Image (tube, rainbow, N blue to C red):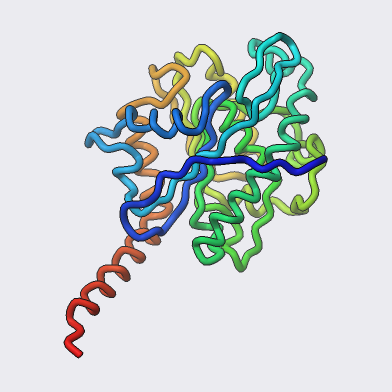
Amino acid sequence: MTAINIPFTIVGPSNPHTHTVVFLHGRGDNAGSFAASLNRSRDSRGRTLFDAFPSFRWVFPQAPMRKCASGPDTWPQWFDVWDVRDFAANEDLQAVGLKEVVPAIRRILADEAALLGGRWDRVVLAGISMGGATGAHVLFNLDVAPAAGGRLAAFIGFSCRCPFLGRSLAGMRNALGLEGVPDHDRVVQNTPVLLEHCVDDPLVLIQNGRGIRDTLRGYGAQVEWKEYPNGGHWFNSPTGMDDVVNFLNRHLGEDISADISTTLRQAFSDAMDLS
């Protein structure tokens, strides 16, 4: 299959760069509008995620335009779905798009890790809705050498589900049949995972979210699961945003603090250089 290149929108850090978040939008959305929409979801301190993590670079890939096999519409979508009311219907259709985009997203992650000195464990993969479903399959098919961190910094999914639910990890990988796939489960098991889902989500029902939670836990992943009574098919705010900030601070906080301290020490040293 011909490799595709995925364009992306970038929101740069306002402080020295320590981490990157690659954030996949949902079906029918686009990278630019999704990036802008994050300004409307704030934590209990009134902060956006950009505000809470000023040393983070944010990368928003753009899904390809795809004709819907079950109707006349063409959408920006990572993969096609035959029936959004029954995701298992004609399920193999979903593999067609995933086979194209998963390798492309792996390349974006690799490029972002290279900007961070080869530190894959400073790159977060996140996604909402179909973006989260796609991100899960990126995680399943990702190999990171121990010398490069052996994992991602985190995987975060919002309002998402898992195509090919109920299969083993090997079965998930076989569904796409990609090259460069690991023969181990270290990346899945060592990458911290946060999944958030609103109970009143009318599009990806809460039981679908619980399904990806149980699947990841079955593979040995470290999953934190958060349900919220309201928020629909979107982020819960402010509690859901608080939970994201707390999760990232717990798992990445030492790295963030260490880098900021180094930067401050260097700045102080430079300021005191009287030679």
Residue 188 versus residue 256: which sits nearer the camera? 256
Taking the image as shown, residue 249 lies to the left or right of residue 264, namely right
Which residue lies at the image location 50% right of the left edge and 39% below the top edge? 60
Which residue lies at the image location 58% right of the left edge and 40% below the top edge? 7
Image coords of residue 186 (percent x, y): 65, 54
Image coords of residue 71 (percent x, y): 71, 9
Taking the image as shown, residue 173 lies to the left or right of residue 118, namely right
Direction bottom: furthest residue: 275
Image coords of residue 9 (percent x, y): 49, 40
Residue 152 versus residue 103: which sits nearer the camera? 103
Q: From this view, report whether residue 79 is shown above or below residue 18.
A: above
Query: Where is the N terminus found, in terms of image quarters?
Result: top right
Residue 106 seen by the camera: yes
Taking the image as shown, residue 1 lies to the left or right of residue 42, namely right
Q: From this view, report whether residue 187 is shown above or below residue 160.
A: below
Q: From this view, report whether residue 123 is shown above or below residue 11.
A: below
Image coords of residue 238 (percent x, y): 30, 29
Which residue lies at the image location 23% right of the left edge and 79% below the top edge? 269
